[in-house]
Image (tube, rainbow, N blue to C red):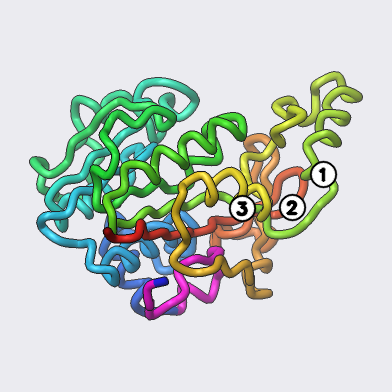
């Protein structure tokens, strides 16, 4: 494993935002104008952790080529375009639930990525392609960096998720880096057992837990063993660090209950927006970095 100055492979934890370096990176990547309390959200943590990791491992170079899987139109694409030689953003733009109502996979990203830019960027360094994560249309070992942020959990059944993870690992160059951020359940809870959710779905006539199947829970988030089996192992790569599952007590102070379209933060405030709860265990973001062994 490479020697790193901080723990990257971890869950999003509220005290992480006390780190001046993380806050500085966050503010460098996201669009300007957020109040300090509005920065306390797991999505911004994902961006900052990605930036800090790529900076530390020397991946922010003018000759580096970066591939983003299920990229949407998120800020790191534009930030990276100002720091590396080539960024390729891929998604099923214009298709699926994330393509409606100006969500991440809006079809306009294919024709006018600048519309979504949070600041000036080197437009000649950013390419946008419509591409399914299960079939990455690039040869083996094509990119210095491959990353996907809180998307792989939405890719379908476990076999689809494994296929996508394998595709990501396949296209990383020797010595290159893969970063996968996903949503992870932080405690064991009986309601996270898929067969029990199916039983509740059946008994309620489909009114409760309507998307549950015998192999997939209603909530698109992983338990630790699922994460290992369906995401980490299929990449064919070793994480650069063991994953730290620790969460500080303060992270639970504003647990947000999310049922349907209704979000109910425990404190009554929208922020911190880090730990959410649906029908079972709470979940938050998990950052996992890998490096492909050099030849």
Which residue is at 54% across, 31% downward?
Answer: 160
Q: Which mark is residue 184?
A: 3
Lower sequence index among marks 3 and 2: 3
Q: Is residue 5 magenta?
A: yes
Which residue is at 39% across, 42% downward?
Answer: 168
Q: Nearer the viewer, residue 275 or 53?
A: 53
Q: Residue furthest right?
A: 203
Which residue is at 34% across, 66% downward?
Answer: 53
Q: Nearer the viewer, residue 42 or 269?
A: 42
Q: Which mark is residue 224?
A: none
Residue on which the image places disc 2: 281
Question: Where in the figure is residue 62, as x and y percent of width and height?
Answer: 10, 57
Residue 70's place in the image compared with 241, above or below, is above
The tally of labels here is 3
Question: Where in the figure is residue 75, as x and y percent of width and height?
Answer: 30, 49
Q: Which region of the structure is painted magenta?
A: 2-18
Lower sequence index among marks 1 and 3: 3
Residue on which the image places disc 1: 191
| Kind of element beneath mark 1 | helix
Q: Find residue 271 and report its image quarter.
A: bottom right
Q: Dot 3 surroundings within 10 Å: few (below 14), some, or many (20 or more)?
A: many
Q: Quadrant of the C terminus?
A: bottom left
């Amino acid at each position: 494993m490479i020697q790193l100055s901080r723990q990257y492979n971890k869950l999003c934890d509220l005290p992480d935002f006390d780190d001046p370096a993380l806050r500085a990176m966050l503010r460098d990547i996201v669009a300007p104008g957020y109040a300090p309390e509005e920065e306390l959200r797991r999505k911004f943590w994902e961006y900052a952790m990605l930036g800090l990791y790529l900076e530390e491992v020397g991946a922010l170079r003018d000759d580096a080529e970066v591939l983003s899987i299920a990229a949407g139109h998120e800020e790191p694409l534009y930030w990276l375009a100002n720091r590396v030689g080539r960024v390729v953003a891929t998604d099923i733009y214009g298709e699926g639930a994330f393509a409606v109502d100006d969500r991440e996979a809006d079809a306009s990203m294919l024709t006018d990525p600048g519309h979504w830019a949070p600041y000036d960027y080197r437009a000649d360094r950013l390419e946008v392609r419509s591409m399914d994560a299960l079939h990455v249309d690039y040869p083996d070992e094509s990119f210095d960096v491959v990353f996907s942020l809180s998307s792989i959990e939405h890719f379908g059944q476990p076999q689809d998720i494994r296929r996508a993870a394998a595709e990501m690992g396949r296209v990383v160059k020797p010595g290159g880096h893969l970063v996968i951020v996903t949503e992870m359940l932080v405690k064991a809870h009986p309601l996270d057992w898929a067969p029990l959710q199916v039983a509740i779905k059946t008994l309620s006539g489909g009114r409760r837990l309507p998307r549950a199947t015998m192999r997939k829970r209603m909530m698109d988030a992983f338990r630790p063993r699922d994460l290992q089996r369906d995401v980490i192992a299929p990449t064919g790569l070793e994480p650069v660090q063991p994953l730290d599952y620790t969460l500080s007590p303060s992270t639970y102070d504003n647990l947000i209950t999310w049922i349907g379209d209704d979000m109910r933060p425990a404190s009554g405030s929208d922020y911190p927006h880090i730990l959410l709860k649906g029908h079972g265990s709470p979940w938050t973001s998990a950052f996992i970095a890998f490096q492909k062994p050099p030849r």
